[in-house]
Amino acid sequence: EEEEEEEVEEQAPTVPAAPEEAPAPAEPAPAAAPAALSGQKLDEWLRLRVYQLRLALGMSVGDLSSVLENLNDEQLQPPFTEAKLWLGFDDNAPLPPAMVTLITEYKCVRSGIAIPTAAAAESSSRATGGGGGGGRGGGWGGGKGGRTGWGAA
């Protein structure tokens, strides 16, 4: 009788209905679109993201904000021709990945739409130092007072 009881105990845990409910936590994220930011709130968001992405700029964050504010949504998507022109990048060279992430997120935040998952994943790995270009050596430059890295003149 002990063997039969052991078999019953082993079979009981294999029948739960939990696997059907497991995907549910992934769905709540896109439920509601974030509120669109503008003015000072958008500038604060931009300043924070430039810092989080460790993006070295050849201009002030205020100037970057002015440039992005004056470009329409079509100009803020690949191949970023107008953005490259106004930000001082070579039109034949690709934008640094952190700048692509920033511009893509900026467009979404000012429009009040959810940030694409690919951009969010790239920015989170970059902000934590992973993904090859992050960490101490990428972005801000790590030198003494000089500006080195992406976008430096």
Image (cartoon, helix red, strand yellow):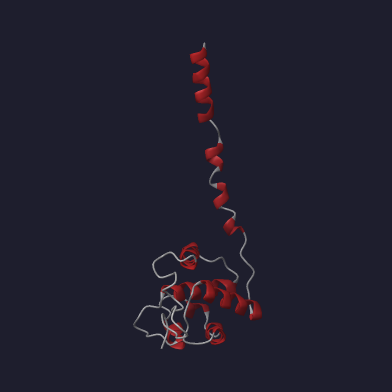
Task: Give how far across and how far down residue 138 sits, in percent.
Answer: 42, 74
The residue lying toward the viewer, choosing from 21 and 96, is 96
Q: Quadrant of residue 46?
A: bottom right
Residue reaching furthest to the top: 1
Residue drawn at point x = 53 percent, y = 75 percent? 51
Residue drawn at point x = 37 percent, y = 85 percent? 90
The residue lying toward the viewer, choosing from 76 and 143, is 143
Q: Quadrant of residue 82?
A: bottom left
Instruction: Relative to 119, say whether 92 is above or below.
Output: below
Left or right position of 131 against 69: left
Residue reaching furthest to the left: 92
Residue drawn at point x = 57 percent, y = 78 percent? 47
Left or right position of 119 against 46: left
Residue drawn at point x = 50 percent, y = 24 percent? 10
Task: Give how far across and how far down residue 50 sits, in percent.
Answer: 52, 76
Left or right position of 9 against 95: right
Total numbered labels placed on residues in the image: 0
Q: Quadrant of the C terminus?
A: bottom left
Q: Quadrant of residue 78?
A: bottom left
Task: Give how far across and how far down residue 85 sits, in percent.
Answer: 43, 87
Left or right position of 73 against 84: right
Instruction: Relative to 84, say whether 9 is above or below.
Output: above
Task: Give how far across and how far down residue 52 sits, in percent.
Answer: 53, 71
